[in-house]
Image: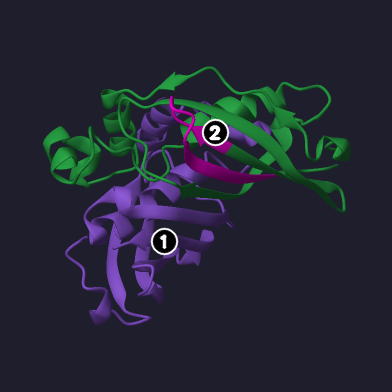
Amino acid sequence: MVNPNVEGKKYPATAPYLVGREKVREFANAVMSKNPVNHDVFAAQAAGYIDVVAAPTFAVVIQERSLHTVLADPEADIDFSRVVHGDQRFVHARPIVAGDELTSELEVASVKTLGAHSMITFETKIYDAAAALVCTAISTLVVRGD
Amino acid sequence: MTHIDIAGLEVGQEIGSRTFKLTRDSLVRYAGASGDFNPIHYRDDFAQSVGLPGVLAHGMLTMGVAVQVAADWVGDAGKIVDYGVRFTKPVLVDATEGATVVVTGKVGEIDAEAGEVRVDLTVTYNETAVLGKAQARVRL
């Protein structure tokens, strides 16, 4: 059972993650993107970006880093082997592009109990090096009870 | 601005469809790209030991491929400003057969003033929906 008292808890910002051009391409290939801006620097620049654009779900890589801090937090008491991903959303202020240096700050938005199960919703705000918001990632995990 | 004329769109209109073949290779590739190395996505013995019928695709992989239908349509993946899904059913990926995921996109809502369109994605595996409320907001 997830500790309901962690609702509202904020976790410290993660160390900066430098978005690499080849990582953007690797991720785009993994999600079977045929979108030129994900792969080709010239196509991305022609569309007005400074470098290749990350696929719409790339922010999960950054979200994961914040999530690890929560899963390692004894106060939250989340048994990872019982975790199922319930839902996921990415709200972008602007797309992530290669060269971005991103940090994330996670807040536990809510903890709900449904019978033996717990549902925990995280809101992860992803910022660039200029401290401007790039993306808000909202994720709900379902932790199965006995 | 994109090549799509918002005035010419209608709610319910199909914007595209794609079939994705997910194999164990796809899962390993996604694990490496995303950093999600949960063994339920590549080890049968581990998946079975935690009570699963077999190796499952990462929900995030299914989410990631599904939105490609909206990205293909708009032409610039950076125009997808908001994208959310619910994970309703797992996608079981057989070691030899893989799994086939079919994605169809339709215009769900048009906001001409904001220049935005909501694309609703239907994502099925074995003729069963595996994602719920899969919606991508696209800025035209």
Q: CA distance from mark 2 to mark 1?
A: 20 Å
Q: How many marks?
A: 2
Q: Secondary structure at mark 2?
A: helix
Type of amino acid under label 2: Gln
Q: Position of residue A30 (x, y in %)?
A: 33, 36
- Residue appearing at x 40%, y 73% in the figure: B111
Q: Where does the magenta region start and end? A: A125-141
> Which residue is identified by label 2?
A63
> Which residue is identified by label 1?
B137
The answer as to whether the residues below labels 2 and 1 share one chain is no
Viewer-nearest residue: A119 or B4: B4
Q: Position of residue A82 (x, y in %)?
A: 73, 36
Q: Position of residue A144 (x, y in %)?
A: 77, 43
- Residue appearing at x 41%, y 53% in the figure: B81
Residue A13 occupies quadrant? top right
- Residue appearing at x 23%, y 39% in the figure: A49
Residue B103 occupies quadrant? bottom left
Q: In which quadrant will I find the C terminus of chain A? A: top right
Type of amino acid under label 1: Arg
Crowding at dot 2, Cα within 10 Å, few <14 / some 14-19 / many 20+, comes out as: many
Q: Is B32 left, or right, of A143 in this rendering?
A: left
Viewer-nearest residue: B77 or A25: B77
The numbered mark 1 sits on a residue in which chain?
B
Q: In the image, which lettered chain appears green? A: A
The outermost residue toward the top is A15
The numbered mark 2 sits on a residue in which chain?
A
Whether residue B57 is visible to the viewer of this picture, yes or no, is no
Q: Colour of chain B?
A: purple
Does residue A31 sit above or below A65 in this rendering?
below
Q: Is A135 left, or right, of A36 in this rendering?
A: right
